[in-house]
Image (spheres, rainbow, N blue to C red):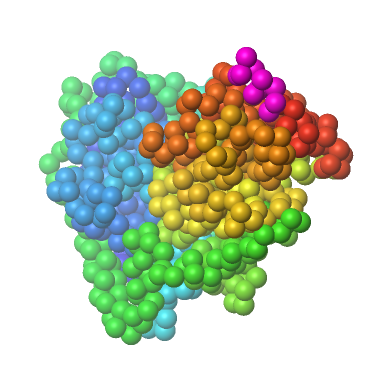
Amino acid sequence: MSEDSSATTSFREDGTTERLTVDTINTIRTLAIDAVEKANSGHPGTPMALAPVGYTLWRDFLRIDPDVPDWPNRDRFVLSVGHASMLLYALLHLARVKEIDAHGNLTGLPAVSLDDIKQFRQLGSKTPGHPEYRMTTGVETTTGPLGQGCGNSVGMAIAERALAARFNRDGFTLFDHDVYVLCGDGDMMEGISGEAASVAAHLKLSNLCWIYDSNHISIEGSTELAFTEDVGKRFEAYGWNVLHVNDANDTHAITQVLATFRETNDRPTFIVVHSVIGWGSPRAGSAKAHGEALGADNVRATKKAYGWPEDAQFLVPDGVADAFHGVISKRGKAAREAWQREFERYRKTFPKEAAEFDLLREGKLPDGWDTDIPVFPADAKGIASRDAGGKVLNAIAPHVPMLIGGAADLAPSTKTNLTFEGAGAFEANRYDGRNMHFGVREHAMGAIANGMALSYLRSYSATFLVFADYMRAPIRLAAIMEVPVVFVFTHDSIGVGEDGPTHQPIEHLATLRAIPGLDTIRPGDANETAVAWKVALSHTHEPTALILSRQALPTIDRGKYASADGVQQGAYVLADCKGEPQLILIATGSEVSLAISAYEKLSADGIRARVVSMPSWYLFEKQDRAYRDQVLPPAVKARLAIEQAGSLGWDRYVGTDGATITMSTFGASAPLAKLQEKFGFTIDNVVKVAHQLIKAHSS
């Protein structure tokens, strides 16, 4: 917990303060009502219910500086109930948070102006339907899919602990911020929140506070229809400090429980706030208050109930923003300036560590981070790309101190455990470890990794490719947010063998490649794996999915064939012929060596063939047309793609006249050699299909 000793302001000390409190809360409510009404789209009910909670938290506890909204030790506020985005936009507007650009420079504009609120949910506005990271200053993470913000917040709390362990020194406290989350019944129903809460309790993240809006309403009606458990008891069982507020309008009670959170230092805090959705409106307490505009008559009735001018729209009464901003700014500016002074003293005493943190803030890697990446000698027997990946990761990690991650209870299989001296496990009260143990919680793992990346860490996660289905939502959100998380997926094909179709991914590569902005890389041998890791960590705005094999892959002789550096272009000519090829073999991963073997046999038969290794469609599509046409000449129509995965998408590269040797069914439980023969992944079959293609195009 942070030790900020600033006193909270009593809302009951005099009539002026109480009136200003009510006016500010009702301003938040009515801005939400008016924005949703104007857009004829949105969710007014939750902002109306939680306005007192948001007001109290921001005004009296949240440590942010509206003038410098990205200072590193600010508290983080996560709106996991992303559909209630107008609550956040109203708070940002009244706090007068200033906008910064992608480089942290002030633009001279407010983060959210009143005109921005009037453009709620409109194309190109800074107030989209759900909060979007990078689009609106003050939005710490993109939320909307329920439960994701909860998972992200655990990653943020982990990051604070890791940063404190790395950089804090006796007499210097650079990191001691807290993470606050507003979540709701939907978040609590989603399994990810339970997974994430379990991790947070296990790690004793006392810098984390979830505020649960228990309004007992979902889209279909009362939560009695499907959700009757005692959520507080569940969190007590996890090991959280559970507190209750019986009325969301009781700002004094809210102040008390938040103060208790600040005093708790041995576990995370879960505050159950009982609210009435759409408070004050004719639709209060009903499902209709959740996800649709109130309607003109109901708006007037609601404003009348608030004592608000019934016909006023987007009204911010005089003094409301001044007072709200004034209190937040006074506390935040003092904290930020004190931090800045301390950091300058720290820089003089610990210049190396200060420079290291400068790089983290800039999203850069240390000089020489890739100097120890191994080069693997040619070897017909080879090494599994998961094993090669583990060696590469352990060569890089000592040079990138905040490269932290782990697996969903599969580190021995994914080979992602950091084994060098001093790596250790990240555990409760030992937050200097580098190895995360996520347990069998893939969904939360992905969201936690995103939260870590949003707080300066270079995070990675790992599991089997078939379990990417469990964590698709956070992978997609990583791409939307443009955060460079590395998602490692091993056991990438029918090469899993005897484990059978439940563990043999088929459609998974296609589903990952379909995510815009995600670099999915399936390297073909150990040296391609080394370059793939280098590419992944060089990304600053793209997450990466590294797809690695369980089985050994021959290490290609780079003296005979092209350099693995071609991975950086996504696809490259690995083996070629003299003159224009009659046939192009395109392959990824474990099938690259198969393509080479077929190429050698075809060449011996007098066929002019080319082998293209295509580990990353994403990177290949970023190359200019000249390069792409050089690798895949348009005039060459005989093209054969080879991949132990579904065929979806390969028509882009083989065209209507080409062919694929891919998977059209699920796999089977058998030794790999038997599976390769059954599904056609043999030299003889590749050569056979190649000859058929050449014949078809020569007739």
Judging depth in this view, the residue of 578 and 444 nearest the camera is: 578
Judging depth in this view, the residue of 478 and 271 nearest the camera is: 478
Main secondary structure of the magenta stretch: helix
Looking at the image, residue 432 lies above or below residue 526: below
Classify residue 375 by image quadrant. Answer: bottom right
Looking at the image, residue 224 lies above or below residue 393: above
Q: Quadrant of the C terminus?
A: top right
Locate residue 117, reporting x and y percent.
24, 33
Classify residue 679 by image quadrant. Answer: top right
> Is residue 242 rendered to the left or right of residue 660?
left
Q: Quadrant of the N terminus?
A: bottom left
Locate residue 662, reporting x and y percent.
69, 30
Residue 361 seen: yes
The magenta segment: 690-699
Locate residue 539, reporting x and y percent.
43, 52
Name the residue rendered at 47%, 49% in the picture.
568
Tally of numbered discs: 0
> Is residue 326 rendered to the left or right of residue 248?
left
Name the residue rendered at 67%, 38% in the picture.
603
Residue 141 magenta-highlighted = no
Name the residue rendered at 32%, 52% in the picture.
58
Residue 259 seen: no
Name the residue rendered at 37%, 69% in the picture.
357
Locate residue 350, reporting x and y percent.
36, 82
Looking at the image, residue 102 lies above or below residue 207: above
Judging depth in this view, the residue of 466 and 91 nearest the camera is: 466
